Amino acid sequence: MKIEVLGQVREYPQGIPYEKIADEYQEQYGGLIALVSVNGKIRELFKHANRDCRLDFFTLKDVVGYKTYVRSATMLCLKAIYDTMGREAVAACRVEFAVGNGSYISSGSRIPATEENAARIKARMEELQAMAMPFHKKSFPLDEAIDLFQEQGMTDKTELFRYRRSSFVNIYEMDGYYDYYYGYMLPNAGYVKWYDLIAYEDGFMLVLPDQKNPTVVKPFTEKRKLFETLQASAKWGHEIGIETVGELNDQIYSGSISDLILVQEAEQERKIGEIAKQIASSRGVKFVMIAGPSSSGKTSFSHRLSIQLRTLGIFPHPIALDDYFVNREKTPRDENGDFNFECLEAIDVKQFNDDMIRLLGGEKVEMPRFNFKVGRREYHGDYMQLGKEDILVIEGIHGLNPRMSYALPEESKFKIYISALTNINVDAHNRIPTTDGRLLRRMVRDARTRGTSAQRTIQMWPSVRRGEEENIFPFQEEANVMFNSATIYELAALKQYAEPLLFHIGKDQPEYYEAKRLLKFLGYFLGISSEELPKNSICREFVGGSCFRV
């Protein structure tokens, strides 16, 4: 049997595990090999080669490889909880969300969140890692899978499986512990070498390396405001009885989605109103600075906040920092030669500060409008002049960076951090990364407003994420308030727009793997029509039909 790797063709016996071939080429790769692509199709390393093929390996530094490591480490942790605390304890655990380099696992009332328990769980993880305990992948008929998890008390998975079209389900098993994951696994626990586990709040924080340095576990850095915002969203989902995709699908199936949308939108409006009251009660505020990563819904939020401020007798004027982009030919490029729209240098900072100072001085200023399709800042006679009591509502990814507003007095700023912090999980042990929700938002919006293909959006996403890490996240804890713009229903609404875009990405394109992953992910959701969405919904900024100019 002939197998090609890195341009070399060698003979191998039929049925050889891909893991053995990976071992032979490990030194030629820049990181630990996690997965293999067989003639363009991803396979786990414990699978076997049965015919002539070409292999390409993925390491922990690749997106798909890194996510495989995170998934495997999570199952290892839950298996250790199963061994040390019992079946009921692991069934009560929820992998809630990520905060920096930590994944928060709430333990309910079954496991006291103590350092002693964290040490016990970690010690069992280390034992399993030392034994290189295998991750076994088994295919179960759907009915048997439902019975299995029903018996284990994992009803969240049985709800999820109710809406599967396939008659079989792939389940992972480790030494008698069964769990379900929507993604790939490493061959065994021996690969999961870098992690830490600490007690945190009402659960535990599984601390992992980042993709850039996948073999280095940095100490967990607390981000208190972000954690509390995420926790509040999780609590709200619990209160309304929708914490997982299965529970959301139940709402859609029962015809209750319209009520859920109205409740969610009302909850967001209530929170926006509370922020407006904080601003109104803050003396000397002239600039409301709104910042957040890509596709957070900053523009719609700024308009809705402005309306709430007007009900309090304040006259706000929304300004988008995106309209101060430098012309395309002046935009800096990243190390890959792509335009770096996320860096501060992509903004005409001086012009922005000059305009703001002139507005504060009572001058009439012609405001720019950036044309994304042609890549140029344009002026169309849109003049603005502030009254004595007016304030400016400024939104953009650099809104909290002091260099962005260097000419403006610090005491005159009220800072808001906004992000789409996904508040629903696939099931109790499969969290949805907030980046997935934002990527889908951006994909749908950019295809509609900027003529950008899904392939190009995925291609640019790593650069976008690097820009966020450098220019946005370092300032998030300095915000006066945080706002979660994600809605519990939005992925079901984005589904109908995103899927056709993703299907356009061919197997010969590097972005195909990510497109296939996202398509599988969206397949868990029942779709809903965007006609159900209010005209002022933040989700409208992406699917279209907003009453705001977004």
Image (cartoon, rainbow, N blue to C red):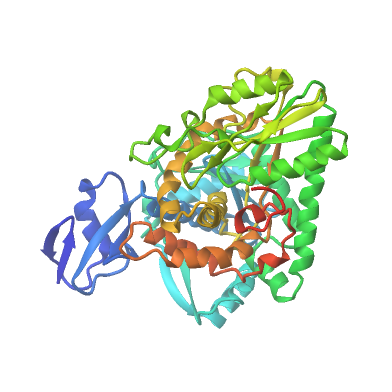
Query: Can I make out residue 405 in this image?
Result: no
For image coordinates 76% across by 28% down, the residue present is 391
Residue 58, given in percent of the width and then of the height, sits at: 32, 54
- Nearer to the camera, 247 or 419: 419
Is residue 384 toward the left or the right of residue 308 in the image? Answer: left
- Nearer to the camera, 401 or 347: 347
**In the displayed structure, would residue 74 be above or below residue 478?**
below
- Nearer to the camera, 52 or 374: 374
Residue 422, given in percent of the width and then of the height, sits at: 62, 52
Residue 466, given in percent of the width and then of the height, sits at: 45, 39
Query: Can I make out residue 363 in this image?
Result: yes
**In the displayed structure, would residue 8 be above or below residue 255?**
above
Is residue 439 toward the left or the right of residue 136 in the image? Answer: right
Is residue 188 toward the left or the right of residue 286 in the image? Answer: left
**In the displayed structure, would residue 237 be above or below residue 280?**
below
For image coordinates 68% across by 19% down, the residue present is 410
Is residue 66 toward the left or the right of residue 431 in the image? Answer: left
Give the image quarter of residue 315.
top right
- Nearer to the camera, 136 or 100: 100
Residue 337, given in percent of the width and then of the height, sits at: 33, 39
